[in-house]
Amino acid sequence: MVGVMDLNERSREILRRVVETYLETGEPVGSRFLSRQLPLSLSAASIRNVMSDLEALGLIFAPHTSAGRMPTEAGLRMFVDGLLEIGDLTDEERISIEQQVSGSHKSVEDVLDEASKLLSGLSHGAGFVVAPTYDAALKHIEFVPIDADRALVVIVTEGGAVENRVIEVPKGLTPSALAEATNYLNAQLRGRTLDEAKAYLARELETQKAELNELTAKVIEAGLATWSGSSAPNDPLEKSLIVRGRSRLLEDVHAVEDLERIRLLFDELENKRDLVQLLGLAEEADGVRIFIGSENKLFSLSGSSLIVSPYMDTQQRVVGVLGVIGPTRLNYARVIPMVDYTAKLLGRLIN
């Protein structure tokens, strides 16, 4: 996929103006309008040529013949990731948010309700807040691939609360591996908290490592295999097992079965290490995240945008999520710092 740095300055500026005008008006943007707005000395014909290039890259499109251009989801994503200039809230806006959300006699439920109303009113979208889970037991967990580097973690607790967190996917982890992780965790870990789930997997790892070491000691003692390479102490995954005497192995059914069991144990250990890493990432996910259009797989709201941020407890653990759902024409430059600040404020108030 083309990145913002793959575009020249002229193309970046025209894409920026197309998106900003669309976000402001909701209407297609024409080349004649841009020629009057751009600081660059460009004719309408030159701008049309650049817009044709941007359209070929899938960043803008014409809703109908002879119309101006509007950004695609890819164009909006490029704008948000590389061209958007995010402002900061003024002191007056911060004070206003604090006064509306906080209060010495408000319950937790009141604080969450006020935060939701605040985000809705300020963004002209639908504000939402997911209540704190306080290490609630898991009912369902799912990893939804967003792209090659990120996945959305959907966590549903036994109490019915839903949390959505975005994680950076470990390199080499495929969508099928995420699906397998989802299936395994839901089969094995229901009713456990995230911390309990990680502890359970750690115990499983140690048990299987012990079994692997016992098996490999037996085949090595029999002169059928040997360890090779450097390794971390007591971590068979960091070693290489070299099999030798293959003709002898073929004569010894038990030795063949042992080696197959060793291979399966290696696979299971590797998978469980991935699971522990995924659960750890799910616990640590933070920061404002933006889903545009069809990227928002959780609610399947094609044509909508979702801006979310978790809020933390005093140990910096994610306890809830808040955000805004609205049209792709959201005022990102204003909503992003608003969601970020409200999440930080809510974390302080909840604690």
Image (cartoon, helix red, strand yellow):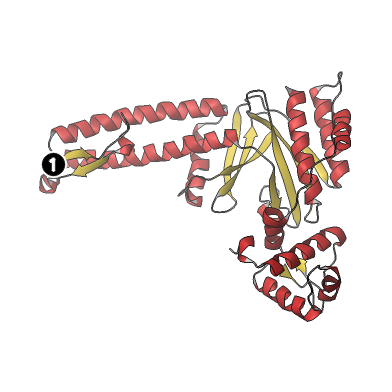
Image quadrant assignment for residue 42: bottom right
Q: Quadrant of the N terminus?
A: bottom right
Residue under the image location 29 percent in, 30 percent down: 211
Residue 242: horizontal and vertical position, in percent?
20, 43
Picture coordinates of residue 119, whole percent (x, y): 83, 40
Instruction: Reply above or below: 70 against 240.
Output: below
Name the quadrant containing residue 252: top left
Mark 1 residue crowding within 10 angstroms, few (<14) / some (14–19) / many (20+): few
Residue 336 shown left or right of residue 146 in the figure: right
Q: Nearer the viewer, residue 331 or 201?
A: 331
Say above or below: 238 vs 57: above
Residue nearest the observer in this picture, 42 or 349: 42
| Residue displayed at 64% across by 37% down | 286
Callout 1: SS: loop
Can residue 326 be seen?
A: no
Q: In the rendered image, which residue does mark 1 sit on?
A: 252
Query: In what quadrant of the picture does the C terminus appear?
Result: top right
Q: In the image, what residue type sits under mark 1? A: Asp
| Tag count | 1
Q: Is residue 273 above or below residue 294?
A: above
Picture coordinates of residue 264 (x, y %)? 32, 41
Q: From the viewer's side, name the closer residue of 343 and 94.
A: 94
